[in-house]
Amino acid sequence: MATHYRLDEQHHLLSTHKTKFQLPKGHFLFTSESVSAGHPDKLCDFISDSILDACLEQDPNSKVACESACKNSLVMVFGEITTNAQVPYETIVREAIKNVGYDNINKGLDYKNASIIVSLDQQSREINQAVVGAKHEDEIGAGDQGLMIGYASDETPELMPLTHHLCNKLIERVQECRVKEICPWMRPDAKVQVTVEYKRDGATFFPVRIHNVLISQQHDEKITHIEIQAELHQHVLKHVLPQQYVDEHTQYHLNPSKAFTVGGPYGDAGLTGRKIIVDTYGGWGGHGGGAFSGKDPTKVDRSAAYAARWVAKSLVASKLCKRVMIQVAYGIGISEPLSISVNSYGTHVEGYDDDDLSEIVQENFDLRPGVIIRELKLRRPIYAKTASGGHFGRSENEFLWEKPKIIDIAAWKSNKEQQQQK
């Protein structure tokens, strides 16, 4: 039966509802999250990228589209792989499970006793012909259609949004505490979430303070909830959170479910490619929808997303804008991008606009897939490292998309002046 309220009762209901987040004018909250290598989805990403690396190590021209799924003690690997490499798939899967930390069924999975199913076929000849054919490497076509997003912001030295940067640092630290047995009660599965209060200043904004932090860390049965909270404060939060953003009002939600002993594939099913926002910018800038893990670099879902980050970071590092989103689109078998879009959110430096930035991008970056692969050296077996901790904002030497390109502004201005004189 429907519930009906008189007007005075409705007014009372409305008047007793209070705004939960009382923020100064021009301030807003933004939240990002990240998950550990032991999260079931990330375990699948790691398995898929470990197989990709094994193929590329022997045959850099391997064509790989490898998916993984897991639940309880069952792990399935499936997809399309064309390679000259001799790859012991089951061995690689078990080693990946072990490396993540699942060596006992009490943790959620045991690499020794897991049931492994491998269902891999070769890449479609039609796709191979469209992408590679008899083309020069620089002219190879995109491995699929789609749009890819790159983003950068000057709010951190890594040119990443602060919310997501802190999430990745927290995940890095909880994994370090587990592996080094700083906190021996920790198990592989974990999730974190960070909310930051920002202040708008015209077209720009900047972080003011950390509003709240949430950590859910899988644990053994021997430790109490109070002990978990104390150790997370001492060994994780104090090591990661920048003190200039922490105040007496910062809230901490540490294992809010109280008990988190059942984790990994035993607590939740996992699937490759289900943490695309965790992999990128924590909700900032947008996402084209394509996952990264298990895909060789002819798949523009991966290589073009790396290139778009490279472009975005280069623009911000060159002080041409304070933050920017790059969108690139491709068609299967076509080498040239179908579109390139630049949005600096009004933060471009005086004397430039987004049209200028778009011209600068097109003059300084060749975004054909074959050129991206060559310039960023993407045929190397570097991908298992990317499967946890995010693909961007990191300092590993192999991640060339994180090294900003020096943009020759003088040359661009000269070319533009010459074109205007014609």
Image (cartoon, rainbow, N blue to C red):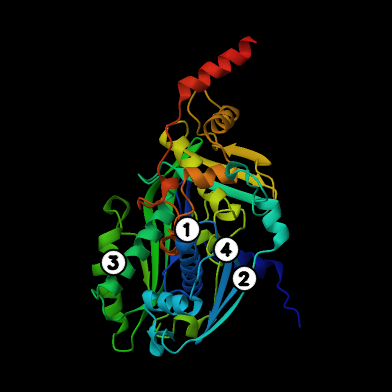
Q: Secondary structure at mark 4?
A: strand
Residue assigned mark 4? 64
In the visual, does 328 lie left or right of 394?
A: right
Residue assigned mark 1? 31
287 to 265, vertically: above or below = above
Q: CA distance from mark 2 to mark 4?
A: 8 Å
Residue assigned mark 3? 236
Please tell me which residue is depicted at 73% across the width and 75% down the height of the picture. Answer: 4
Q: Quadrant of residue 231?
A: bottom left
Whether pointer 3 and pointer 2 mark residues with C-beta atoms closer than 8 Å, the reply is: no
Q: CA distance from mark 3 to mark 4?
A: 37 Å
Q: Position of residue 158 (x, y in %)?
A: 37, 46
Disc 3 marks a residue whose amino acid type is Val
Q: Position of residue 393 (x, y in %)?
A: 40, 51
Disc 4 marks a residue whose amino acid type is Val
Q: Residue furthest top?
A: 421
Q: Earlier in the sequence, mark 3 or mark 2?
A: 2
On the question of residue 20 being in view, the answer is no
417 to 307, vertically: above or below = above
Q: CA distance from mark 1 to mark 4?
A: 34 Å
Q: CA distance from mark 2 to mark 1?
A: 34 Å
Disc 2 marks a residue whose amino acid type is Gly
Give the numbered dot on residue 77.
none
Q: Nearer the viewer, residue 272 or 384?
A: 384
Q: Secondary structure at mark 2?
A: strand
The N terminus appears in which quarter of the rendering?
bottom right
Q: Earlier in the sequence, mark 3 or mark 4?
A: 4
Q: Earlier in the sequence, mark 3 or mark 1?
A: 1
